[in-house]
Amino acid sequence: MSRDGMKAVTRMTTTMETTRFVQLLPPLLLLLLSLVRLCLSMVATAGGADGGAESALPRVRMSYKDLLESNRSSTFYGSRGGGAAVHSMLLDEYHERLFIGSRDLVYSLSLDAVHQDAREIRWAAPAFQKELCLMQGKDAKRCANFVRALHRYNQTHLVACGTGAFHPICVFLNVGHKAEEHVFRLDAQKAESGRGKCPYDPEQSFTSTLVGGDLYAGLYSDFFGEDSAIFRTSPQRHALRTEHADRRLLDEPRFVAVHVISDTDDHDDDKVYFFFTEMAMETDGKSKARYSRIGRVCANDAGGHRVLLNKWSTFTKTRLLCSVPGPDGIDTHFDELVDVFLLPTKEESDPLIYGVFRTASHVFQGDAVCAYRMSDVRDAFNGAYAHKEGPQFQWAAFEGRVPYPRPGFCPSKLTSPPDSPLRSTRDYPEEVLHFARSHPLMARPVVPAHGRPLFVSTGGSGRGSGQRLQRVVVDRVQAEDGHYDVLFLATDAGLVLKVISIEREGVSAPEEVVLEELQAFKVPTTITAMAISVKRQRLFVGSAAGVVALQLQQCVSYGSVCAECCLARDPYCAWDGLSCSKYQHATRSSRRFRRQNILNGDPFMQCLDQNNIAEQGVGVAGALAVQDEQQQQEEQEEERVVFGVERNSTFLECVPRSLRATITWHVQHAHSGLTQEVKTDERVARTPHGLLFRALHRLDAGVYRCRSAERGFTQGLRRLRLHVIADERVRALVAPRQPHHHHRQPHHHRRQPHHHHHHRGRHDADDAEDDVVCASAGPAGRGHGHRAWHEGPAQPPGHAGAAEYCERAWCAERARRGQQAAGAAGSPASSPPVPMSLPGAGGGGATRRRGPPHDGRRGRGKAKRTPRRAAVPSPGR
């Protein structure tokens, strides 16, 4: 046999053995292998095209406290502070109000300050209706009026619909002609039934919109929550709905959103698009799967004449795809649609559709954001219909004759001449209506604009935190190098992520950059509603706790130098020569004063001509020689002194402003004077907050410098001088002492120097406080069980820490001074007290000072004494 033949036989044998091995693998192992493959493909996509892991982290993370202290957020938790659960939200720029639908209440909040000028209307269900709800077996918590819908009816009134304790009801709210009128009242006399407009159950999925007096809603319209339908109710026209119990139209749907979008200038040609998920009919019953859908009806649909009477005659739907292409042709699908946002463009008929999706699997969790063009949506609905064909009745594109007019076609003035007999859907032939009833599904799905998601989160939106995306709003921002769509993504933990997606030529996967992570609420809570006011540059976030208003940007949080501002890559912000401030798209003459680079975030090219470049320490390899400037910067850095006890744990805090920065530590040893990079091992560990010594050694003493580096920009953050207190000195100090044979003088006899009468009151107060501190210390210093957060189990038992050592040294020195003062009063010839020697100066974590600790405390006047925190700086400082 030839050599090529031998190779062919070998390949065939190997292939057969591999196939046999795969067939023998347990099904669960195969599932795990496929999940691993999907994880790898999703993680690769989530990284983007450039700087994946770096861009996945938010550059700035602001806590709830940070937002309040910086005046970036304002909160509303109900008129009595007991909470205001948000079940619906309406942003009204005309009246300058934010309307909130809650349980038995409707709120009207100011757009400029939600915590001020709040008004409310109490709208509860009647008592007899609540009793009937309980008698019918419903939960008492749900037997209330949950306001699920708020829509603007005209310039003076809103339409509000509530569950009414499982008896839906709708009313009008009078809000006045202008914001200055301060009108907000309920017109109870005009109440009407809410069936077909609002669900019975407050927890059921529901969506609605009001256009031209017509209310379009997707909901479950019965008491038991079994009749899912798409409704149109109108005071001028008869109501329309989808056929009852027809699973070809709706199969266990979860309604997400509804929008009316114009195709042309003729409003008779307007379409209503419903976004929902449902059990897919394409699976042929072999396995249950939930798909995301986009459904469409004509706004002027009048139903059929005999067929589809008072039913939608133009309803069609198709699949909404959001998937990550796999390396072997197998895509990772995000099949559950969670939220939808329409971003207006210059063309009113071509908005961008943004959707939040998640995986349907409970084993592997992931979230994604996909964007769609209206042109792709129209192409899908104008394409082929789907139907079953062949001996296996498989789904395929329908290639037969389609009746005229095409099902789903909207009669209008532009498409139907005045003498046409087809002026309404009631004039359509029965053949058209029968075809529309039996072919509601389109064969072509709607794919994302870029063929893949703009943003992918695996393992939770917090990059492994287990959080899930809930809501999305988008703002198109004009920057120096073009416009960018800024995504605000809300999670089920009360966080808001500020994200941009950057596209590059020749790169298929866009680069996703997380700019900020904002903790909108004090405690984790699911964000249920979100609205944006571009005019006021505010984002309104609602949850079960209440409402929070956030400013879209706070540029000063990125830093105080040009490089930090450019590295942020925030389209809202630019360096104006003095600070990082809001970018204003102005005339060309003023652009030379602004520095912004969203595409690359290059600090070198943008900040090269700035006067303070020496202070920034911008370092691009081979581009700038900034060693002298960095040395000058290090000399100007404030030095802080930290005390640690040998064989005990000690923490050196250093937190960079940017979470994407890389931290390096260098130490100049006290015993040798040599400077080297700090190496980590089982004894020394790096944490996100700084450097942790699990067991301190005498040779660890020295000057530690913490520096950050990000895209070539290096910056000195902190300089800490670490003093190591010998273990034997601590043992000698905390060892039991022999009791004194003489009695202590009373407090008012200890301090008698006549030349300090004007300080006597302050000294007496200080002494009283010192007595309490020293008495509370006791023979064991800090009480049992008291341990700082960084003092782990590695701290040896029986060894006092630096805080305890400094505390005891302070109390011992104070006692000796009191004894010397008492002796001096009786014997003027007694020698002055000798201060106790301490290694270094000052208390731990404070700026460097000279003299013993007690002198430093006296010099601080009214400063509060905290001897227990003197050894190690607080991690939160």
Image (tube, rainbow, N blue to C red):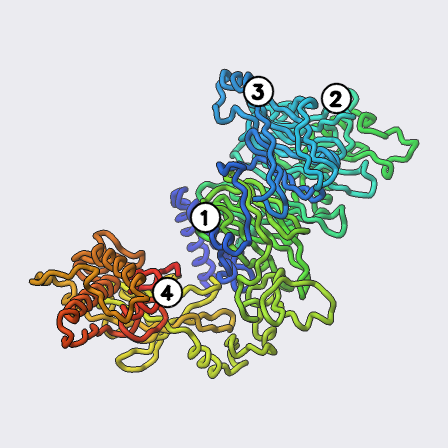
Horizontal relation, residue 109 to residue 136: left or right: right
Residue 792 position within the rendered picture, expressed as x and y whole percent measured from the top left? 27, 57
Q: Give the spatial CA distance, label 1 vs label 4.
A: 40 Å
The reply to whether callout 1 and callout 3 are in contact (CB within 8 Å) is no
Q: Which numbered disc, 1 or 4, marks the residue that appears first in the sequence?
A: 1
Tag on residue 621? none
The residue tagged 3 is 126
Horizontal relation, residue 281 to residue 737: left or right: right
Residue furthest toward the right?
419
What residue lies at 39% left-to-right and 45% top-to-bottom? 29
In terms of depth relative to the viewer, which is nearer, 856 or 284?
856
- Classify residue 399 by image quadrant: top right
Q: Quadrant of the N terminus?
A: bottom left
The reply to whether callout 4 and callout 3 are in contact (CB within 8 Å) is no
Tag on residue 35? 1
Mark 1 residue crowding within 10 angstroms, few (<14) / some (14–19) / many (20+): some
Q: Which numbered disc, 2 or 3, marks the residue that appears first in the sequence?
A: 3
Q: Which numbered disc, 1 or 3, marks the residue that appears first in the sequence?
A: 1
Q: Which numbered disc, 4 or 3, marks the residue that appears first in the sequence?
A: 3
Mark 4 or 3, closer to the camera: 3
Tag on residue 653? 4
Q: Give the spatial CA distance, label 4 vs label 3.
A: 59 Å
| Amino acid under disc 1 | Leu
| Amino acid under disc 3 | Pro
Tell me the element at label 3.
loop
The reply to whether callout 4 and callout 2 are in contact (CB within 8 Å) is no
Q: How many marks?
A: 4
Tell me the element at label 4.
strand
What residue lies at 44% left-to-right and 53% top-to-bottom? 15
- Classify residue 393 by image quadrant: top right
Q: Give the spatial CA distance, label 4 vs label 2.
A: 73 Å
